[in-house]
Amino acid sequence: MPKYKVVAHRRVHKFISELKDEKLRNMIKDAIVKLENYPITLREMDAEKIKGLEKTFRIRIRKYRILFHVDKTEKTIYVMHAEIRKKVYKS
């Protein structure tokens, strides 16, 4: 039974739908779905806390990054960005 609800921003959905590489698209989707099992999945998915932002983490998938925020009181994970590494940290 999933512990956390995962909510992805519409820009994340748009980014995933525009990916041409089917394998990469599935890898990103699977990583987002695995977030339901927070905090267990953090170890296996190479997630790290982002310095300077409270309760915000990143996951690496090849040269792409997924940024998400954890709200423990509501048991919800908000996926804010999914983008190539160069662009994700600038927004």
Image (cartoon, rainbow, N blue to C red):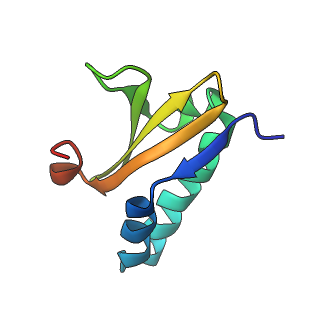
Residue ranking furthest to the front: 74
Comparing 64 with 62, the one in front is 64
The relative height of residue 73 versus residue 9 in the rendered view (above or below) is above
The picture places residue 3, in percent across and down from the top left corner, at: 75, 34
The picture places residue 71, in percent across and down from the top left corner, at: 56, 27
Residue 73, image quadrant? top right
Say whether residue 84 is visible.
yes
Residue shown at the point (41%, 60%) measured from the top left: 12
Residue 15, image quadrant? bottom left
The relative height of residue 9 versus residue 54 in the rendered view (above or below) is below
Q: Quadrant of the N terminus?
A: top right
The picture places residue 58, in percent across and down from the top left corner, at: 38, 37
Residue ranking furthest to the bottom: 20
Comparing 20 with 70, the one in front is 70
The picture places residue 17, in percent across and down from the top left corner, at: 43, 75
Comparing 60 with 87, the one in front is 87
Relative to 31, 51 lies left or right: left
> What is the total number of numbered labels drawn onto the structure image?
0
Residue shown at the point (36%, 77%) measured from the top left: 18
Say whether residue 62 is visible.
no
Residue shown at the point (67%, 42%) measured from the top left: 5
The relative height of residue 25 versus residue 65 in the rendered view (above or below) is below
Residue shown at the point (50%, 60%) measured from the top left: 27
